[in-house]
Image: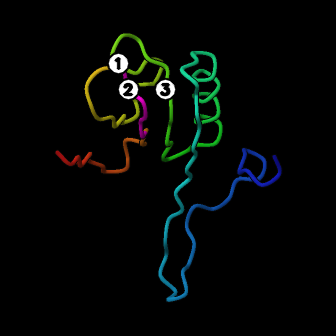
């Protein structure tokens, strides 16, 4: 994957915007795991290798009514009762809260 930052072609995370101010890039992924443990393990490897900040997951791997296989070193946002149908996984260095509508 030539376009992905790796150890060999790491992209500088700080960039100047049109105003000349420094901004920080966020690395985001989106994936449908189809409730697979193996797909979850592969996602974790990619998240570590690519140093991702935010991952949007559809059909996450569930153990009972909780999402399984995701590290505690990340913030995992979900909503609703029962099996989780979607999740957002965020690096701990990003402040995030879940806002739901009742």
Residue 77 point in image, percent of width and height: 34, 37
Q: Is residue 95 left or right of residue 74?
A: left
Q: Which residue is mark 1?
A: 66
Q: Nearer the viewer, mark 1 or mark 2?
A: 2
Q: Position of residue 31 (x, y in %)?
A: 59, 38
Mark 3, residue position: 60
Magenta segment range?
A: 83-88
Q: Say above or below: 81 vs 1.
A: above
Q: Position of residue 34 (x, y in %)?
A: 58, 25
- Residue 28 is a magenta residue: no
Asked if labels 2 and 1 touch by Cβ distance under 8 angstroms, the answer is yes
Give the farthest residue toward the front. Answer: 102
Q: Earlier in the sequence, mark 2 or mark 3?
A: 3
User: How crowded is the residue under tag 2: few (<14 C-alpha within 10 Å), some, or many (20+)?
Assistant: many
Lower position in the chain sequence, tag 3 or tag 1: 3
Residue 49 locus on image (x, y percent): 65, 36
Callout 1: few (<14), some (14-19), or many (20+) C-alpha neighbours within 10 Å? some
Q: Residue furthest left?
A: 102
Kindly indicate whether the residue at mark 3 contacts the one at mark 2 (C-beta within 8 angstroms).
yes
Nearest the viewer among 77 and 58 is 58
In the depicted structure, whether residue 7 falls above or below residue 42: below
In the rendered view, tell whether residue 100 sits above or below residue 33.
below
Residue receiving disc 2: 84
Do the residues bearing badges 3 and 1 touch, measured as CB atoms within 8 Å? no
Q: Categorize mark 3 by other alpha carbons within 10 Å: few (<14), some (14-19), many (20+).
A: many
- Give the quadrant of the C terminus: top left
Q: Left of 73 or right of it: where is 59?
A: right
């Amino acid at each position: 994957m030539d376009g992905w930052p790796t150890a060999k072609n790491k992209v500088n995370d700080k960039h100047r915007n049109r105003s000349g101010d420094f901004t920080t890039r966020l690395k985001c992924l989106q994936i449908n795991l189809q409730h697979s443990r193996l797909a979850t393990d592969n996602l974790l490897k990619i998240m570590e290798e690519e140093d991702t900040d935010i991952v949007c997951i559809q059909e996450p791997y569930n153990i009972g009514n909780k999402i399984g296989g995701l590290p505690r070193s990340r913030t995992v946002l979900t909503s609703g009762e029962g099996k989780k149908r979607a999740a957002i996984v965020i690096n701990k260095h990003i402040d995030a809260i879940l806002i739901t509508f009742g």
